[in-house]
Image: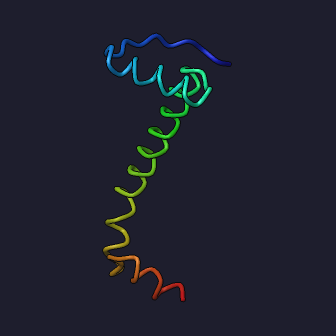
Amino acid sequence: MDSTLTIRIPTKERSRLSRLSAELGIPMSDLVREAMRRYLALQELAAIRRRLVPLAERKGIYTDEDVFRIIS
């Protein structure tokens, strides 16, 4: 079920959001929802990375090249 969240944003950001909304023809609420989804996804990936990096380093995996070497 969807719910409503009211937030305060600075006037400058509101103006930028409004301009982008008009330029893209996308409602401001849709732009904000998409920005929130992306931010949450990035934060979730960062949390996963923080948990996995120490495990990888214990196995000698430090770079992308190390990963490619192992899976090749």
Give residue 13's quadrant in the image. Answer: top left
Q: Quadrant of residue 23?
A: top right
Q: Is residue 39 left or right of residue 10?
A: right
- In the picture, which quadrant includes the C terminus? bottom right
Across and down, in percent, residue 15 comes to: 40, 18
- Colour scheme of this structure image? rainbow
Above or below — where is 15 with respect to 40? above
Q: Is residue 64 above or below residue 35?
A: below
Please determine whether, in this image, residue 40 is positioned above or below residue 3: below
Identify the residue at horizontal 37%, vertical 72% (top origin). 56
| Residue found 48% across the figure and 86% down from its top | 70
- In this orientation, which residue lies closer to the viewer: 10 or 68? 10
Find residue 45 and report its horizontal and vertical position in percent. 45, 51
Q: Residue at x 39, y 51 (%)?
A: 46
- Residue 45 vs residue 12, the one in the foreground: 12
Q: Determine the image quadrant of residue 2.
A: top right
Give the vertical position of 59 relative to 20 (above or below).
Answer: below
Residue farthest toward the right in the current orientation of the protein:
1
Q: Residue at x 41, y 44 (%)?
A: 43
Q: Position of residue 66 (x, y in %)?
A: 39, 83
Quadrant location, the N terminus: top right
